[in-house]
Image (cartoon, helix red, strand yellow):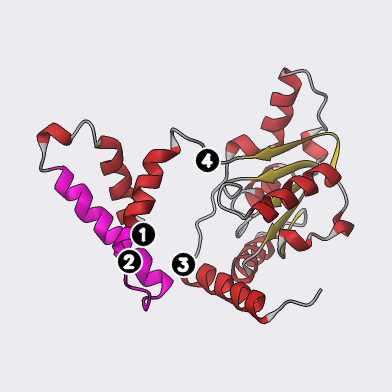
């Protein structure tokens, strides 16, 4: 189905945001095939052998997670799907420079998942289930349902309350800091939000009776300010 003008504009904006802001991509130990195989075995499952597994990561950014896994599992195969073309290009450059042949990054929207990719022993979706649309959530679960191998394991992480309330406070503070500044670029909005977060954290330090109650918020505010 052809995209309408509004969808094309939305896609272009998403690509621009990723290109302007970038995204730090880290390895996540809990998502490694070896960890998932061990955990599955401990709870009574018979998961596929991690050393030779096919692994799919949805929302792979530039591959900071699966590239490191590919290095340590040369007999396994890793495929990452990422919406941002800029991120995919950066990741594939790293893969090429490292001369890795068992990992690849593909640019694409999971709503248009390529069915020809086949089945995977492990499917990873780390850190984005909480903020994607309901349509994408359904598609993610559909991909797992139809492309996870027998006895395979899917790892899907998401934010939950009450723990997420603290992080959400910082997010709401950054959004509040940018009210009325629609003319700013996404990068400028992030910088403004970090600056306000830093100022709030500094002010909290001036009140001895609030230090303990707001210690978590203060740490988060400074973390956002430092990037």
Upstream in sequence: badge 4 or badge 1: 4
Q: Quadrant of the N terminus?
A: bottom right
Residue extending furthest toward the bottom: 5
Marks 1,2: beta carbons within 8 A: yes
Q: Residues within 10 Å of mark 4 (few under 14, many from 20)?
A: some
The residue mark sitting in front, 4 or 1, is: 1
Q: Is residue 48 visible?
A: yes
Residue 112: percent from left, percent from top: 78, 63
Residue 130: percent from left, percent from top: 57, 47
State the extent of the magenta-drawn residues as a range. Answer: 176-205
The residue mark sitting in front, 3 or 1, is: 1
At a point 27% along the width and 54% down the height, the residue shown is 197
Q: CA distance from mark 2 to mark 3?
A: 19 Å
Q: CA distance from mark 1 to mark 2?
A: 7 Å
Q: CA distance from mark 3 to mark 1?
A: 16 Å
Q: CA distance from mark 2 to mark 4?
A: 25 Å
Name which quarter of the figure residue 51 lies in: top right
Name which quarter of the figure residue 103 lies in: bottom right
Q: Secondary structure at mark 3?
A: helix
At a point 30% along the width and 65% down the height, the residue shown is 192
Residue carrying label 1: 175
Q: CA distance from mark 4 to mark 3?
A: 22 Å
Upstream in sequence: badge 2 or badge 4: 4
Upstream in sequence: badge 2 or badge 3: 3
Q: Is residue 61 above or below residue 170?
A: below
Q: Secondary structure at mark 1?
A: helix
Q: Residues within 10 Å of mark 3 (few under 14, many from 20)?
A: few
Q: Secondary structure at mark 4?
A: loop
The residue mark sitting in front, 4 or 3, is: 4
Residue carrying label 2: 179
């Amino acid at each position: 189905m052809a995209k309408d003008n509004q969808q094309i504009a939305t896609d272009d904006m998403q690509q621009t945001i990723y290109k302007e802001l970038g995204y730090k991509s880290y390895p996540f130990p809990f998502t490694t095939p070896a960890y998932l195989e061990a955990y599955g075995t401990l709870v009574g499952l018979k998961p596929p052998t991690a050393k030779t597994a096919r692994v799919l990561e949805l929302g792979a950014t530039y591959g900071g997670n699966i590239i490191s896994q590919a290095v340590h599992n040369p007999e396994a195969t890793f495929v990452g799907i990422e919406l941002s073309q800029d991120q995919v290009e950066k990741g594939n450059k790293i893969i090429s420079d490292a001369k890795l042949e068992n990992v690849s990054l593909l640019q694409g929207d999971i709503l248009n998942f390529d069915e020809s990719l086949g089945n995977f022993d492990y499917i990873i979706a780390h850190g984005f289930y909480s903020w994607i649309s309901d349509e994408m959530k359904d598609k993610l679960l559909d991909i797992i349902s139809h492309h996870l191998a027998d006895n395979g394991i899917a790892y899907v992480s998401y934010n939950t309350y009450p723990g997420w309330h603290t992080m959400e406070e910082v997010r709401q503070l950054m959004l509040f800091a940018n009210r009325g500044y629609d003319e700013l670029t996404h990068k400028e909005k992030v910088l403004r939000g970090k600056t306000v977060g830093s100022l709030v954290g500094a002010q909290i330090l001036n009140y001895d009776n609030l230090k303990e109650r707001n210690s978590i918020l203060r740490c988060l505010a400074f973390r956002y300010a430092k990037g």
